[in-house]
């Protein structure tokens, strides 16, 4: 298995005191978005899935949505002499280009993430005052 990075929204910002809480909510909203807006095609259900992946960086860990897929299987389709295998190969990469181009920083998704975050905080303690979006 290998993965292809789909990205994140940027709602959770390193250095923010609520970074991990915001990150968890952001990743869940985006994962739900991919599942509902770009379901895995039936042909690929046994060899591909969405998940959250943690990446390590000098300034701290961060997460992004990725598509895990069976790269050996996809490569075998490309190398096959069967025309229908080439069609499936092309279908996979066409589908990936569509999901890869999703606007994860759209106002609609950002608003969904903010709403989910605000529902999770204790307003009486002022937890909601640390919300910020990087430009």
Image (tube, rainbow, N blue to C red):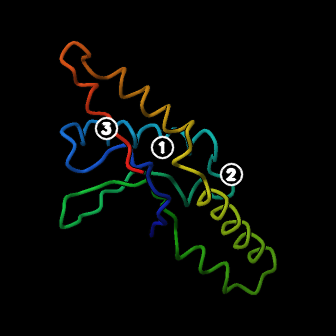
Q: Secondary structure at mark 2?
A: helix
- Alpha-carbon distance for marks 2 and 1? 18 Å
Which one is in front in this view, the residue at disc 3 or the one at disc 2?
Answer: 3
Pinpoint residue 96: horizontal percent, then vertical percent: 63, 63
Tell me which label, 2 or 1, sits earlier in the chain: 1
Please name the residue that numbered disc 3 is placed on: 22
**Name of the residue lying farthest toward the top:** 124
Q: Quadrant of residue 26?
A: top left
Most foreground residue, 29 or 78:
29
Tell me which label, 3 or 2, sits earlier in the chain: 3
Which one is in front in this view, the residue at disc 2 or the one at disc 1?
Answer: 1
- Alpha-carbon distance for marks 3 and 2? 32 Å
Q: Quadrant of residue 48?
A: bottom right
Q: Secondary structure at mark 1?
A: helix
Q: Is residue 17 above or below residue 81?
A: above
Most foreground residue, 126 or 28:
126
Query: As drawn, is 48 to the left or to the right of 135?
Result: right
Q: Residue at x 59, y 60 (%)?
A: 100
Pinpoint residue 40: horizontal percent, then vertical percent: 62, 51
Q: Which mark is residue 31?
A: 1
Please name the residue that numbered disc 2 is placed on: 42
Pinpoint residue 133: horizontal percent, then vertical percent: 38, 43
Query: As drawn, is 90 to the left or to the right of 115?
Result: right
Q: Residue at x 67, y 66 (%)?
A: 92
Q: Is residue 132 above or below residue 121?
A: below
User: Dot 1, crowdedness within 10 Å: few (<14), some or many (≥20)?
Assistant: some
Tell me which label, 3 or 1, sits earlier in the chain: 3
Query: As drawn, is 31 to the left or to the right of 94?
Result: left
């Amino acid at each position: 298995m290998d993965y292809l990075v789909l990205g994140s929204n940027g709602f959770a910002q390193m250095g923010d005191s609520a970074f991990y809480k915001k990150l968890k909510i952001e990743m869940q909203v985006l994962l739900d978005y991919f599942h509902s807006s770009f379901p895995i095609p039936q042909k690929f259900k046994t060899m591909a899935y969405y998940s959250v992946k943690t990446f390590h960086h000098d300034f701290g860990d961060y997460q992004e949505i990725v598509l895990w897929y069976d790269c050996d299987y996809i490569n075998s389709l490309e190398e096959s002499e069967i025309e229908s295998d080439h069609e499936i190969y092309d279908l996979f990469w066409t589908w990936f280009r569509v999901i890869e181009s999703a606007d994860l920083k759209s106002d609609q998704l950002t608003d969904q993430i903010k709403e989910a975050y605000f529902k999770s905080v204790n307003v009486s303690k002022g937890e909601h005052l640390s919300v910020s979006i990087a430009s």
